[in-house]
Amino acid sequence: MIYIWPKLKDMRQKIVAGNWKMNTSQAEALTLAGELVDGLNGSETATLIVCPPFPWLVSVKAKVASAGISVGAQNCSNMEKGAFTGEVSPAMLQSAGISHVIIGHSERRAIYHESNSLVADKVNIALKNNLSILLCIGETLEERNAGKLHEIIDEQLTEALKSVSAEDFKSIIIAYEPVWAIGTGLTASPEQAQEAHAYIRTKLAAIASEQIAENMSILYGGSCNASNAATLFAQKDIDGGLIGGASLKSEDFLTIARSF
Ligand code: PEP
């Protein structure tokens, strides 16, 4: 019998990503980055990604790259280039050596009215520019209470991924972030999170294929911290976390990174 070892990118990865949001001065960002590098002890089995604010992307990358920590932006434009004041294009991120970008975060959906269609445009242009994507999806409390969890997941995934090729699914990480759990201290229970993640994987199988869905990483986000990460990450379909508040403390972020 010939055993064909799967290509590394074809295997589901454990990932812990930190979303620093609009926090940190330049000095604070570099201190945090330095503490992460110094704090690694080799027992971290997950891929680590940090997503600082735009102005610190390049300097943080210079600090963490040699330690194997990847750097992502928190947003990107849906446009290639031109007269779009204040926007940052995926091509710019790519040329600055940034490998990842968060797209569809609930704060952008809610505060900046980003629609599923805009999210889809951003996904497509980011893929075209060879960025890996952390695609955020998740329901509000009203939607959950109205029994619309699956409907919302269906809509958000179907629209965002409708033009993605089989090959490009390898560059997509899903972050399930129930809106009611983000920054609120209310975490989804491991059972609630697992149920949603399993549903997302089934939906990905329907959109792409079972094999693609099996190989995709689905992260949990929403008040995940050093105390609850291990129980969440122990769930079958939870492959890591997208961490907001707790990613601003190096010790907490590193504890989460070791919670598998
Ligand atoms: C987030 O904003 O992606 C997030 C998960 O935030 P927090 O961990 O603070 O809830």
Image: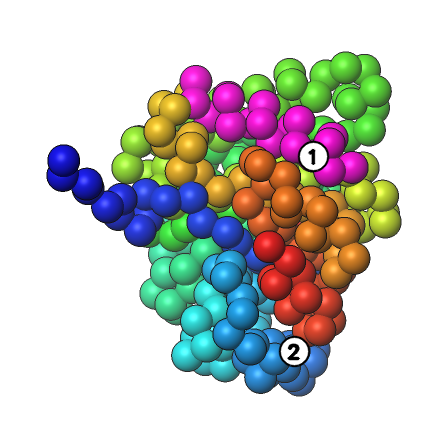
Of all residues shown, which one is farthest toward the front? 1
Q: Amino acid at mark 2?
A: Leu
> What residue is rendered at 43% in x and 71% in y?
68
Magenta span includes 196: yes
The colour style of the image is rainbow
From what the image shows, is residue 251 above or below residue 13?
below
Q: Which residues are magenta?
A: 189-206
> What residue is rendered at 65% in x and 28% in y?
196
Q: Mark 2 — residue? A: 32
Toward which corner of the image does residue 165 lie, by quadrant? top left
Q: CA distance from mark 2 to mark 1?
A: 29 Å
Residue 226 location (% of width, % of height): 75, 60
Residue 67 location (% of width, % of height): 46, 77
Residue 169 location (% of width, % of height): 37, 37
* Quadrant of the snapshot with the N terminus: top left
Q: Mark 1 — residue? A: 193
Secondary element at image label 2: helix
Query: Is residue 53 at least partly visible in the picture?
Result: no
